[in-house]
Image (tube, rainbow, N blue to C red):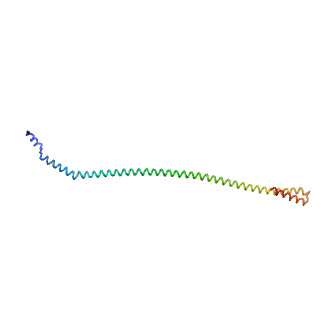
Amino acid sequence: MLDPRLFILNAEIGFNAGDMIVQLVMFVILLALITKFAWRPLMNVMQEREEHIATEIDSAEKNRQEAERLMKEAQDELKGTRANAQKIIDDARQTAKSEEADMIQAAKSEAERIKENARQEIEQEKERAVQALQEQVGTLSVQIASKVIEKELTVDEQEKLINEYLEKVGESK
């Protein structure tokens, strides 16, 4: 059976089953209210926050990938630009070498033409000098010969001799 002391102990502690049931019902009601008005909205806010953060992370990752792609394109374009610049420099060097060779060849050709013109002028001057010298020699020879022969030749013989000499000088030219 039940020990009366147990009831007394209960009375002293204040353990009452009715109070306990009321408190349990109140707790369940409070739990239902908290669930309906606090827990679900809090969970919805947390879910929305989680989705927002996930969206931001995805967006940041896409932006990072796009930035990497753009950086790679910029690097490739820079490499292409450097290659084009080097090609332009190389072409300019080749053009400069070619023009230098052309200028040297043109200068050599011009020098050769000037030398040839000088040779021709020298040859012409030489021929004129020789011709003038021949005329002077002919005239002096005739004069010398005439002075030497004058004493022994007549005027007719002198003219004949001069004409013959002039014909010989004319043929030697």
Q: Residue furthest front?
A: 171
How many numbered discs sit on the rendered protein? Answer: 0
Image position of 113 (left or right of 54):
right
Q: Please identify the quadrant where the N terminus is shown.
A: top left
Assign the C terminus to one quadrant of the image: bottom right
Q: Position of residue 77 (x, y in %)?
A: 46, 52
Position of residue 5 relative to residue 136, above or below, is: above
Q: Nearer the viewer, residue 140 or 28?
A: 28
> Where in the figure is residue 111, as x and y percent of width and height?
67, 53
Q: Is residue 158 above or below residue 28?
A: below
Q: Return the x and y of residue 16 as percentages of the image width and height.
A: 11, 45
Q: Position of residue 151 (x, y in %)?
A: 91, 57
Residue 63 is left or right of residue 116, and the answer is: left
